[in-house]
Image (cartoon, rainbow, N blue to C red):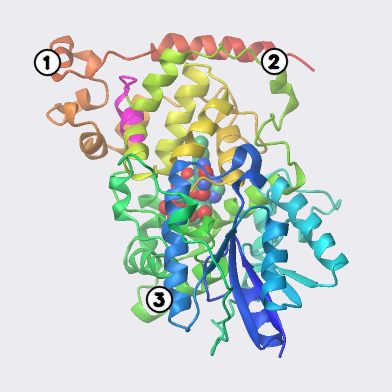
Amino acid sequence: MSTAILWFRRDLRLADNPALNAAMAAHAKVVPLYVHAPDEDGEWAPGAASRWWLHHSLDALDASLRRHKGGLQILQGSSLDALRTAIEATGATAVYFNRLYEPKAIARDKWVRGELEKDGVAVASFNAALWCEPWDIATQQNEPYRVFTPFWRNLRTRIDAVAPVAEPSPMHLATLPTSSSLDALGLLPTLDWASGFAEWTPGEQGAQEMLDLFADDAVGHYVEGRDIPARHGTSRLSPHLHFGEISPLQVAEGLRDRVKKRKSGADVEPYLRQLGWREFGHHLLFHFPHTPKKNFNPKFNAFRWEKRDAHALRRWKAGKTGIPIVDAGMRELWATGWMHNRVRMLVASLLTKNLRQHWLLGEKWFWDTLVDADLANNAMGWQWVAGSGADAAPYFRIFNPVTQSEKFDPDGAYIRRWVPELASARGRLVHAPWEDAAFLKQSGYPQPLVDLKSSREDALTAYQSIRSGP
Ligand code: FAD
């Protein structure tokens, strides 16, 4: 009658959870445990928006476990101490968990595993987050990939071979004599800035509903729709994927099934390729763990960033740069904890190129405000736009936010939604309100923080100095 601990981390689901399945198969009782140990993540402990999500996701997981006559057990403190406490209280002989890929988590898990094994406890870990773990895929020269297309070509050949596993049933769950309450973790904000997050439903059920919604229609128009921020043209699964409420295996299989049932004939391949970027991000983070803090391309170490401009940063964060598409994005981020991918690229480009502020500053703000803040994807995204990353956009390709806005938000629906000062702007003015001084004054919308043309030229000049370097 052995007991095991299932150590939940960012795999907050019951279906397609290989550690849970393995624990259930081998033990009479399983204790589902979450350990709150934010200090172990160092400076990349979850930001405020992520903590909001985590609270609701843990709550949803607890509710699911209660349907199986259990409940999520919560402990605080160091992971090792908490696991030892749980082992001692239940007589558990084994600990099961799903792997994480952030450098600090890898080091912590290795250490915890070693200590528990020294205590005589069996430890087993699994892949629940990726189609292919970073060490299982390599170039022909047996090196890590640095370019996305060949990475994807290789990965694509592997993904049909893996299928999700069903939720174990029945589940035999056990509890601890004492468990912390979710509220005691203090994850929710004390000020009411997250009221706009109500449109999200964190948790496994919410993830499945989001997948349903996407499969209903948008997946069939993904190629054209994914760049239009005014539309729900993308899946919005990123926070669900980050917290492991759904796996890429489930997304791929779920989409195929739903498309088949609806006989829509939608092509899911372009969408799967985009999920490939998530895998690429994890691959890069594992093989080049310095990338959340340091340029992937060392040439950029010599780049002349402007010194930190507190005023510009404040306006950028508040969505008051005077560049409508950028402000719309920054306000969407603040209000909902999410921003459309196309707009993420534009706000990042303005910050790193026109304002020449270091990409680390933007990365940090996103870390605190995104509900999908993910070390691998965020670092890759910022370095991609800044030009310093692996397979990045070349530095000299500087987005023009006005032409981008005209192209991807032609009637200004996205801007009007998030920047109400411009709701009545006619024609091109919604993209460039400074072109009519009287309208700008009457709207109350600010003058642009930066001249787009001259700042672009300055950025290109700054780039020349490293381009000719070694
Ligand atoms: P969909 O278009 O529906 O894509 C499906 C899934 O594929 C996403 O949920 C995501 O997991 C993955 N994906 C899609 N595009 C990318 C991409 N470019 N890079 C990596 N994965 C991708 N994504 C995060 O998940 N967390 C972040 O912290 C993050 N920071 C970013 C910062 C910058 C500056 C930029 C330019 C991009 C960032 N992204 C980040 C990538 C991308 O913007 C989001 O994954 C996407 O907008 C999420 O919306 P979605 O789920 O509707 O995407």
The answer to whether mark 3 and mark 1 are in CB contact below 8 A is no
Quarter of the view holding residue 79: bottom right
N-terminal-most mark, 2 or 1: 1
Q: Does the residue labelled 1 lie within 8 Å of ligand 1?
A: no
| Residue 206 in the image: above or below residue 227 | below
Q: Name the residue under label 1.
A: 442
Q: Where is residue 137 in the image (x, y as percent from the top left)?
A: 76, 58
Q: Position of residue 461 (x, y in %)?
A: 58, 9
Q: Mark 2 belongs to which amino acid?
A: Ile
For the point 35% across and 53% down, which residue is it? Answer: 233
N-terminal-most mark, 2 or 3: 3
| Residue 266 in the image: above or below residue 103 | below
User: Is disc 2 placed on a helix, strand or loop?
Assistant: helix
Q: Where is residue 469 in the image (x, y as percent from the top left)?
A: 76, 14
Give the quadrant of the N terminus. bottom right
227 lies left or right of 297: left
Q: Mark 1 belongs to which amino acid?
A: Gln
468 lies left or right of 204: right
- The secondary structure making up most of the magenta span is helix
Please rate how many residues cluster around mark 2, counting C-alpha atoms within 10 Å: few if below 14, some from 14 to 19, many from 20.
Answer: some
User: Is disc 1 placed on a helix, strand or loop?
Assistant: helix
N-terminal-most mark, 3 or 1: 3
Gap in angstroms between the C-alphas marked 2 and 3 = 50 Å
Q: Name the residue under label 2.
A: 466
In the image, which residues are magenta?
A: 320-329
Give the quadrant of the C terminus. top right
Q: Mark 3 belongs to which amino acid?
A: Arg
Q: Mark 3 points at which residue?
A: 258
User: Is disc 3 placed on a helix, strand or loop?
Assistant: helix
